[in-house]
Amino acid sequence: MPYFLNFGTRDSCVRESASFLCDNSYRKMESWKVGIDCCSWDGVTCDRVRGDVIGLDLSCSWLYGTIPSNISLFLLPHLQHLNLAFNDFSFSPISSGFGQVARLRYLNLSGSQFSSQVPLKLSHLSQLTSLDLSHNGFVYLEASFMKRLVKNLTKLRELQLHEVDMSLVPVSSFMNLSSSLTSLTLEACQLSGRMSNNIFHLPNLCELNLKENRELMGVFPMANWTNPLRFLDVSSMTFSGELPKSIGNLKFLRNLGLNECSFTGSVPISLGNLTQLTHLDLSNNDFSGEIPSLLSKLKELSYLALQFNQLTGLIPASLGNLTKVTEIFLKSNNFIGHIPSSLSFLKDLRSIDLSNNNFEGKIPNFFTNFTKLIEVDLSNNQLTSQIGEFHRSNSLQILRVENNKLYGSIPKSISNLANLI
């Protein structure tokens, strides 16, 4: 049975006709009952001493409808934490009433089907340490909001604006971001212009995501680039020239996404210094030369993508040292020679794509014996051999070997590939 929820103060947080229409909530709101202390309700946090409501977590609660400006939620004077993520507010505007909750430190409105302009009053929440407006589809920011945010929200540590339209915001707005920031996501925000490399020098930044801003240009610091970055993704931004060796100074980096960034030159040897990397994506650039053998030092790596470049030479046998790798993509380069047998050490491999190169020689037997391997693409090479026998516990779903120089009969053991699609 649908019902309304009224968010009152500590003394009146009871269920009655008011604001949010809730239909078959994921939480079911079974604990939200008249006559029961609201501090025991699911998603409600109260101060242990005074009993004031200081936190509301109603994420994933199937709330829908609009949020009126006179809702009692905005009158909770001690509220510090508010999470309304992943509900459905019918593409209504974000209410300026959120700006009245002066003590808010955490505000999450992500994925809740809001629309229209982000109200300027949200930039008055000077106590905010975390703001998330991501994944709302039709929300946009104006330059005046960003200017106020930079000026007023000096305590901000996390700013998540994934898919918020910022096409009206000049990139110069990011020159004076708070040095307290630890996480900044501006993915797919329609930013344009040249981003100052000051953003890469923020002293406490652990996560920076600028990917999918195709009109945005950037320049990495050439020297003295050290900070605690663990996640860096600037895919589909435009950079010019070579990837600077200073990238190797980011010793804490675990995820590096540089897909489609127009880099040229060789893959820097300094990447071998990033020994905590688990994800490395250099695909869709113009890197040339050979794969540095020092990449074999990346013992934590699970994902390696170098496809669609101009890389040449042999695949270094030392790649077989990357024993935690589960996915390798080397498609559409100019590699030559034999596929190294050392890849047989990659027992956790699930997907490998070596297509559209100039590999020759035999198809290594380990491709038909690995029990975790799901996808193999060796098409469009110069391989000359028969197809080996397939292990009975083989997990292959996709096998591509067309446009090679294979000979002989198809092995009967191909019938063991019960998962093949």
Image (tube, rainbow, N blue to C red):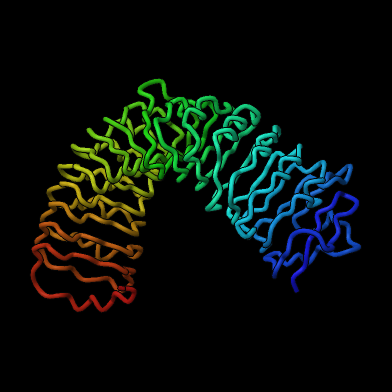
Q: Residue at x 64, y 47 (%)?
A: 108
Quadrant location of the N terminus in the rendered image: bottom right
Say which of 282 and 151 sits in front.
Answer: 151
Query: Residue 284, position in %: x, y?
Result: 28, 45
Quadrant in the rendering for residue 243: top left
Say which of 288 and 92 sits in front.
Answer: 92
Q: Residue at x 69, y 70 (%)?
A: 24
Query: Residue 376, position in %: x, y?
Result: 26, 62
Quadrant in the rendering for residue 235: top left
| Total labels drawn | 0
Q: Residue at x 63, y 51 (%)?
A: 93
Answer with left or right where residue 98 lies relative to residue 392. Answer: right
Answer with left or right where residue 154 lies relative to residue 31. Answer: left
Say which of 53 and 355 sits in front.
Answer: 53
Query: Residue 339, position in %: x, y?
Result: 18, 52
In this view, 247 is above or below 304: above
